[in-house]
Image (cartoon, rainbow, N blue to C red):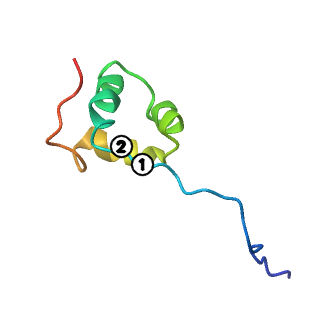
Amino acid sequence: MTDFVKPSGSSRKPSYSIKPADVPFIKKRIREGDFLNRIAADYDVNPGRISEIKTGLRYAEIAAAP
């Protein structure tokens, strides 16, 4: 069995961090019926982060954009 070793100097970038300013627009898209995975792809985040916003685990105090 071969052990995988991550090459040094990997060019992978971390995912985007959702900022409070993004949340109203994300909530609006959720309200309009966009798929969570498509919203997540647009923000380069895991769909779980969008689900946390949808269920109120994160940013519950921020309202959706009109």
Q: Residue at x 72, y 66 (%)?
A: 10
**Residue 36 picture quarter:** top left
Q: Relative to 1, is 52 above or below?
A: above
Q: Residue at x 18, y 43 (%)?
A: 60
Q: Relative to 13, is 52 above or below?
A: above
Mark 2 burial class by Cα count in 10 Å: few <14, some 14-19, many 20+: some
- Relative to 14, 25 lies left or right: left
Say what secondary structure mark 1 lies in: helix
Say what secondary structure mark 2 lies in: helix
Q: Using the numbered discs, state the Cα–Cα distance from disc 1 to disc 2 in whole angstroms.
A: 5 Å
Residue most extreme to the right = 1
* Residue 24 placement (x, y as % from top left): 26, 30
Residue in the foreground of this view, choosing between 43 and 35: 43
- Relative to 55, 46 lies left or right: right
Q: Quadrant of the N terminus?
A: bottom right
Mark 1 burial class by Cα count in 10 Å: few <14, some 14-19, many 20+: few
Q: Residue at x 36, y 43 (%)?
A: 51
- Contact (Cβ within 8 Å) of mark 1 with mark 2: yes
* Residue underneath mark 2: 51
* Residue underneath mark 1: 48
**Residue 65 picture quarter:** top left
* Residue 11 placement (x, y as % from top left): 71, 59
